[in-house]
Structures are given as structure tokens and as C-alpha cells.
């Protein structure tokens, strides 16, 4: 989902060739709120084309880390490097304009607006015409909106939500609201997609659908994904690598198999008997 308004799948060979390069790195990031240390010298990287899970018990600092990556929080220490550019912190407008999109732990949609209009808001950064031109809706402005609407309709088809395209999202069940929020994030054509508990509150069938969409987004559009999720079955099935946080510290980093066998992770989070 890069560059062109009309989404084009990336070939498997091109995707495989691109994977392995570091897209984003977090180096010794620390974040405090008063006397509370949310993150303590955390370092890890996210490679192009992978699904990178961030897990840990409640209060471990997972959402704080996503908020640092997309610029909502500014760390007191450490460096964020995205696409080779080093920053002490990221700014939200830079994150969005440079290809970082996210969904939220609690659904953040415009409840009175339709599915179509909610996803269209994700195209705002791609629009080049001014407010006056858009209000007149003629000529170049009209053609621009038609192109963006076409991209949004493609996303609606991809997520299999055509039947709710005109439905106000406030009337939708929670699982479908989560899917609409994913659609809005995809509408920005992200290189890095941050998913904060995308399956929270879902039943088994909804989780299976969301898992399928996440894998398809990664494999078809070569979108890199950072995932926070408490369902360990989902995490182990989807993830290429996992970083584990506990009380703001990184306690493990590796493949799903390596993390499952790590005694510090077992003691802090997984709860598997020795």
C-alpha cells in the first residue's frame, strides 16, 4: 500500500528481498511520568516486512512504547531511528506523514460518521487541494477526491465490510469497529503499522478474521507491523519476533520459541510451571 492511491500487491520475491533491513530502532529509551518510570533503557528494532510483537503483563509499558514510537509521548532519554533518520523523539505529524499509522487499545472512531467516511479521514494527509477547493468540489479537487474514494473502496472490499460502508460506526458491534479502525490506518498507506490490542474484546471467530487480515496486510502489501496483544496463541502464531517488557524493562527478545522457553518470561508473564 505504498505510493500509489490505487493499492497494488507486492510480489512475494520483492517482499522477501526487502525483509531483514531495520526499519525502526529504539535505543535506550526511557520515559517517566513524575516518579513513575514507564520505560527504562529499552532497546529493540523492527525489521522491514516482519510482524514484531510487544508483550508483557499489564503496566509493563507496552502502550507507552507505541506512544513513543508515533510521537504521542516524548522520552526523557534515548533515540528513535526511523528509515535511517535519528531523533531524540518523534512528532505525531512526522510519524503520520512519514509512514507510521496506528490503531488504539480503545476504539477511536467518529461514531456518528459512516464506515466509509471514517476510513476517508485516513486519506487526509494524502490530499493536496485546499479547503476552499474541496468545498467547491470541482475540477482538480473533484478528481482528487474520486481517486481517494477509490482507494477507500478498495480497502472496504479488502476488509470485507462492504455491507456496512454506509452504517454509522457507533451502531456496529465491537469487532467490526476494530476492523473499521484498521481500515482507517491502512488508508494512510503505512510502512509501519502499530496495532494496540487489535483483538481485545473479540470472540474466536472475530480473532480468526483479524489474524487473517493482519497476515494478508503484511504479506500482500509488505507492511511492517508492531503488535501488542494479550492472546498468547495469536502472538505465537502471527509473530516473527517478540520483545517482552516487565515494569518498563526489556526482559527478553527473540523468536516465539525462544521467548516461550525464557525463564524470566515464564516467571513474569506466561506463568508456565518450571
Image: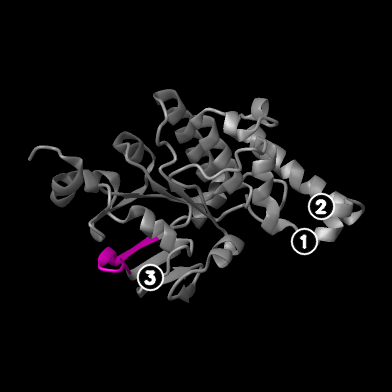
Q: Position of residue 239 (x, y in %)?
A: 37, 44
Q: Is residue 37 magenta?
A: yes
Q: Nearer the viewer, residue 174 or 243?
A: 174
Contact, CB < 8 Å: mark 1 with mark 2? yes
Range shown magenta: 31-45
Cα distance, mark 3 to mark 1? 32 Å
Tag 2's secondary structure? helix
Q: Neighbour class for label 2 at 10 Å: few (<14), some, many (≥20)?
A: some
Is 128 above or below relative to 170?
below
Residue under the point 14% across and 38% down: 272
Q: Is the C terminus in the top left, top right, bottom left or bottom right quadrant?
A: top left
Q: Quadrant of residue 97?
A: bottom right
Query: Residue beneath label 1, please?
Result: 128
Gap in angstroms between the C-alphas marked 1 and 2: 8 Å
Task: Identify the element where label 3 is drawn.
Answer: loop
Residue 66 image position (x, y, % from top left):
42, 57
Mark positioned earlier in the residue sequence (3 or 1)? 3
The Cα atoms of the two marked residues, 3 and 2, are separated by 38 Å
| Residue 123 visible from this viewpoint | yes
Q: Which residue is mark 2?
A: 144
Please report the residue visible at 47 percent of the width from the left and 55 percent of the height from the top. 19
The residue wearing badge 3 is 75
In this rendering, the count of numbered labels is: 3
Amino acid at each position: 500500500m505504498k505510493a500509489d492511491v490505487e493499492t497494488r500487491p507486492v510480489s512475494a520475491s520483492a517482499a522477501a528481498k526487502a525483509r531483514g533491513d531495520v526499519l525502526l530502532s529504539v535505543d535506550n529509551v526511557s520515559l517517566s511520568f513524575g516518579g513513575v518510570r514507564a520505560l527504562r533503557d529499552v532497546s529493540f528494532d523492527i525489521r522491514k516486512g516482519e510482524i514484531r510483537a510487544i508483550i508483557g503483563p499489564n503496566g509493563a509499558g507496552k502502550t507507552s512504547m507505541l506512544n513513543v514510537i508515533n510521537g504521542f509521548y516524548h522520552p526523557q532519554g534515548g533515540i528513535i531511528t526511523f528509515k535511517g533518520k535519528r531523533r531524540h523523539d518523534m512528532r505525531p505529524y512526522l510519524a503520520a506523514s512519514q509512514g507510521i499509522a496506528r490503531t488504539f487499545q480503545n476504539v477511536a472512531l467518529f461514531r456518528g460518521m459512516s464506515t466509509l467516511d471514517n476510513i476517508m479521514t485516513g486519506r487526509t494527509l494524502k490530499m493536496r487541494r485546499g479547503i476552499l477547493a474541496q468545498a467547491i468540489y470541482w475540477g482538480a479537487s473533484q478528481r482528487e477526491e474520486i481517486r481517494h474514494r477509490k482507494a477507500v473502496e478498495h480497502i472496504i472490499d479488502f476488509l470485507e465490510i462492504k455491507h456496512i460502508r454506509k452504517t454509522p460506526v457507533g451502531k456496529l458491534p465491537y469487532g467490526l469497529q476494530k476492523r473499521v479502525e484498521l481500515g482507517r490506518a491502512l488508508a494512510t498507506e503505512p510502512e509501519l503499522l502499530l496495532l494496540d490490542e487489535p483483538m481485545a474484546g473479540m470472540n474466536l471467530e472475530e480473532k480468526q478474521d483479524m489474524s487473517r487480515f493482519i497476515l494478508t496486510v503484511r504479506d500482500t502489501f509488505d507492511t511492517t507491523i508492531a503488535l501488542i496483544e494479550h492472546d498468547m496463541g495469536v502472538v505465537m502464531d502471527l509473530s516473527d519476533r517478540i520483545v517482552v517488557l516487565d515494569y518498563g524493562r526489556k526482559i527478553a527478545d527473540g523468536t516465539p520459541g525462544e521467548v516461550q522457553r525464557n525463564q524470566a518470561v515464564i516467571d513474569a508473564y506466561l506463568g508456565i510451571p518450571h
